[in-house]
Amino acid sequence: MSIMTEAEAKAILDKVIALSQADECTATLTGSVEGNIRFALNNVSTSGVVSDISLGVQVAFGRRVGTASINEFSDAALERVVRRAEDLARLAPENPEFVPAIGPQTYRPSDTFSQATADITPQQRAEVARASIEPCRAQNLIAAGFLQDSQSFVAFANSNGNFGYQKATDANYTCTVRTEDGTGSGWVAKNVQDIRNFNAADDIQIAMRKASASVDAQALEPGKYTVILEPAAAAGLISFMANFFAARSADEGRSFLSKPGGGNKIGEQVFDPRVNLYSDPYDPNVPALPWDGDGLPRERISWIEDGKIANLIYSRYWAQRQGRTPTPGPGNLIMTGGTKSTSELVRETERGILVSRTWYIRMVDPQTVLLTGLTRDGTFYIENGELRYPIKNFRFNESPVIMLNNIDELGRPVRFGDDGPTMMIPPMRLRDFTFTSLSDAV
């Protein structure tokens, strides 16, 4: 019973709250059923389904907090986990940043669940693998990929009267295609909430074309170039930057959004006026849970408006300290753009470099968000609106803050999902992107 109904979940949570003798208690149930299939060297290697459900309990005596978790739900087990959390709380030191559990909230459900995704069968997963492998075999290419689908639920309640419940689904597909000699590589990724919006037979063609076209890559001197970043390539850089939108790190001088002498840059022009970034749990393309990790209700909120910093994330503790209203953390990130595809941006580019994917991104300097990483899986030189030839991959040193001040044009946003919030990110043509050295990776 990894996916509980709202009534089943609430019955357990109510029992937990009633059992607690602490000053306050918060209980959270999470459950999921995750299916997967993995293939490599044009053969399926593993396939399976993993189901799990767990209960987390957090209690507080004053500012002393204890947590415990369990994955069985008999009355005796529920009492055991509550007592364990209380024992730990009595032993814990006082937390100077403790904030009491949030009171009753009203959550408007968002459209995070697809029955079609929840109903995926092993045969459907096998068909995704077949649709990826067979075209590659026919062209002497080698495919390696992974499909993971999930249905999940989360329910929580606390002794201050708050309660929430929602189900969600997600499917994530990635595939790398190599030439037989290993000198050409292409990659494709697809993230959907509704599996009916995914067709592996179409998406695999992207990776196949790039693999075949990237053979015999030529070396280009490192330097500053006009680049077109595909959405997957841009997403890794933008998501890194979004990690620095906490008001506390900005106010304490630890962020690119810190002002010299103290304070933050809310209201200041930091990016090109065409940059707009916001979150909206009710966006039909990237719906998210209607609350954040603290239980704060989410609504549409702008982070960047016309290049100016519109809002920062104020945790409940930091909002209390600063006399501000708490800001819920984002469940998605949506960057506006234009109407053109990546191909159309290429056709309008006199000279530049097409970057399919950025990889192994690491922080160099948090106060400027200077990042380093590698291009991978299809990097091409553009001349007179055409992909002239493949080029060897680069290491780059670039800040998304600088990058988003060097915009030539933004294209049509597409959905991209990875480890962080699901995103809608446009392809983008940028000036003076900094490549520092060549890489032997394909």
Image: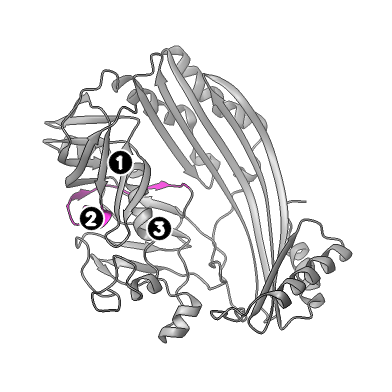
The residue singled out by tag 1 in the image is 230
Question: What residue sits 79% from the left and 66% below the top?
Answer: 81
Q: Nearer the viewer, residue 52 or 336?
A: 52
The residue singled out by tag 2 in the image is 404
**Which residues are the magenta region?**
399-418
Say if the magenta span includes residue 109.
no
**Residues at marks 2 and 3, CA–CA distance in whole angstroms:** 16 Å
**Residue 92 in the image: above or below residue 433:** below
Q: Position of residue 143 (x, y in %)?
A: 47, 23
Check residue 266 in the rendering and tell me which mark sits there, or answer none.
none
Q: In the structure shown, which secondary structural element does the residue marked by tag 1 occupy?
A: loop
**Residue 333 in the image: above or below residue 46:** below
Chosen colour scheme: one colour
Q: Earlier in the sequence, mark 2 or mark 3?
A: 3
The residue singled out by tag 3 in the image is 333
**Residues at marks 1 and 3, CA–CA distance in whole angstroms:** 17 Å
Question: What residue sits 53% from the left and 48% below the top?
Answer: 193
Q: How many marks?
A: 3
Q: Amino acid at mark 1?
A: Glu
